[in-house]
Image (cartoon, rainbow, N blue to C red):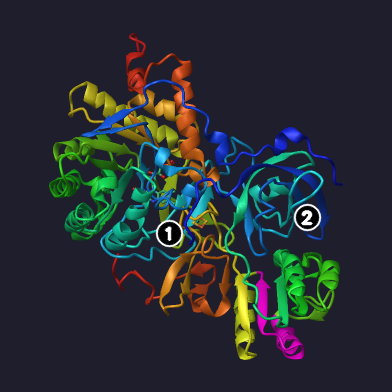
Amino acid sequence: MTEPVAGRIPQVAGELIATRRVGAYQHMTFVAPGIAELARPGQFVAFAVGGQTSANLLRRCFSIHRVSPSGTYGGTVEVVVAAKGPGTQWLAALRPHDGVDIVGPLGRAFPLPKEPVPCVLVGGGYGSAPLFWLATQLRERGCPVEMVLGAASEDRLFGVVEARRSAGAVTVTTDDGSVGTRGWVSDVLPEVIRRSGSAVVYGCGPMGMLESITRVAGAEGAVAQVAVEESMACGIGVCMTCVMPVTGNDGVTRMVRSCVEGPIFRGDRIRWESFESGWGRVPADAVGAPARGGH
Amino acid sequence: MATAPTTSSTRHTSARGDQHRLPAIDLSVQIGGRTLPNPLMTASGCAANGKELHRFFDVSQLGAFVTKSVMGGPRSGRGTPRMAETPSGMLNSIGLQGPGIHAFVKDDLRWLKSVGARAMVSIAGSSSGEYAEVAAVLRASDAFDAVVGVEVNISCPNVANRGLVFACDPLAAAKVIALVREKLPRDIPVLAKLSPDVTDIVEVARSCVKAGADGLVMINTLLGMVIDTDRLRPQLAGVTGGLSGPGIRPVAVRAIWQVHAAMLEGRLPTVPIVGVGGVRTGDDALQMVAAGASAVQVGTATFNDPRAPHRVLHELAHALATRGFPGIHDAIGIAHTRLDPQR
Ligand SMILES: Cc1cc2nc3c(=O)[nH]c(=O)nc-3n(C[C@H](O)[C@H](O)[C@H](O)COP(=O)(O)O)c2cc1C
Ligand code: FES
């Protein structure tokens, strides 16, 4: 972590200026002065939900879909919301001009390759949200970009049209075959990596998908950079709820906070075998792991 | 559906907005041999060790910065899920993840000192000996002059007594406090942090004060549990967890009230009480002060608003000033003097 500077992360009274249903999701644009200017692809914003006296205290975190630092009304930040609980439902139901407290940008951004190497960007469901902005930045550096978008069904895909604008080629998969290839992104990914000669695979989506992206990338000789989604209570590194086992440059595994050390990790650094049926276990060799029968 | 925003709501509320002056009342509080410039503190485990919150406000402006409970060695903490949202609060089971006291004093304590923060170091242990050892390492560290107090988190399982938490056992609690007190210079206050999950909190409080505690911190989380109804299993990997947030505030106010009342009645020596549990606003903090707290910590509310400790300080100061109090001291325990004599 770089040395903190007092007051450096903006916390702003955001204002919703546009909201639109896209399939199963809500695409929302907020005026959030100060955040857009600092944000980079892969970072996220944390919303307080339910207003000042809300009984839902925990922040809801969303990967930034896009920013416009110099919009007519000041910088804007866009997110894609899947309304699955009381907090996200409150957010998705906001009307234009409604206010919401936003903190960001938070977390580490996707690392960009130094050389103009080909890249594949893989998104599962609304996980594709940050990838279009990333694709634009990669192409500005001369990296050829392909995208793979997958979801359970057509209404759960996000940004297929935008993908065609942002990437050289787009492959779509759905579990039910309602559009694109029937199956998972990992079914088509080996061929996409080989065809494009990609050196980096960027992924964002559910944990199971990120694990398979990492496995396929490794088998094809590419590096996977994945954006994880662990449940977060604060988003700013103070609660320790969002941890996962990640191996550092020194070869040592630690339980690290995905909100500050992530959400982007090299896929091959995550201890995938620790995740099972919704549990994230502490590997026995992790720093400070409880001794067997101890604690 | 894009529409022009109303300018007033796009106002920037970053740290700069909070720098307005505190009202000219005496906010200083005395804890043991130390005087703190104001009564606001972070709550242990809700603010990490300072660097993260310093990105939102200057942590040296708080009366004290309370660090995450630290043990002898590094701890990975528990597996996930570690939390569940509850009505006006949350349940957590972190498992005291931390770097261990040696790394803590080298990195975190030095950093707190470098920004001029007053550190209230929270220590933990799984045996009374471990608490004492942690206190001794802290005492010997080169940044010890940044320490304004040691908060002893006695809500830890005692391995020597089949995992019964120290805070639920007045004798074990007293032993920990006495050992820690011995390891630290007299001018460093030792505060015992009590658990509300006891039959008689006054008894534990008395035991700790008699053992040398210079202050009491009330309350730690309440033991709770949430079932995930999709999977029909405990939502936390650790099964049970600690309940915190505004939902527990009445429990905290009650605990402070009972112990302060016991002090007024002479049932235990009078020491300062630090109130914690569900404080979100200055008004919440004022409830604790009126019930008998000399200082107040903000915990879970920080997850909702990263600047909450700093904001609550300003709100409390204004709440006191508006009510005509010349200083916080004049409001401590005032609710005890305002009972219906006919009750
Ligand atoms: C995520 C989390 C971690 C905590 N960790 C500690 C800890 O390490 N040591 C401790 O004494 N209390 C710990 N607590 C308890 C708080 O310091 C505080 O006593 C309690 O949460 C009630 O205050 P609140 O409602 O303002 O959060 C923790 C609380 C939470 C929510
Ligand atoms: S979400 Fe709180 S530490 Fe990461």
Q: Does the residue labelled 2 lie within 8 Å of ligand 2?
A: no
* Rendered image quadrant of residue B25: top left
Mark sitting on residue A27: 2
Residue at mark 1: chain: B
* Residue B5 locus on image (x, y percent): 79, 39
Q: Do labels 2 and 1 share a chain?
A: no
Q: Quadrant of the C terminus of chain B?
A: top left
Q: Is residue B339 visible?
A: yes
The nearer-to-camera label among 2 and 1 is 2
* Residue A101 locus on image (x, y percent): 64, 42
Residue drawn at x 38%, y 16% as measured from the top left: B326
Placement of B258 over or under B83, stated as above or below: above
Residue type indicated by callout 1: Val
Instruction: Name the residue that disc number 1 marks.
Output: B239
- Comparing A279 with A158, the one in front is A158
Q: Does the residue labelled 1 lie within 8 Å of ligand 1?
A: no
* Rendered image quadrant of residue A288: bottom left
Residue drawn at x 72%, y 89% as measured from the top left: A197
Q: Is B122 on the left or on the right of B61, as rendered? A: left
Residue density around tag 1, few if under 14, some if 14–19, many if 20 or more, within 10 Å = some
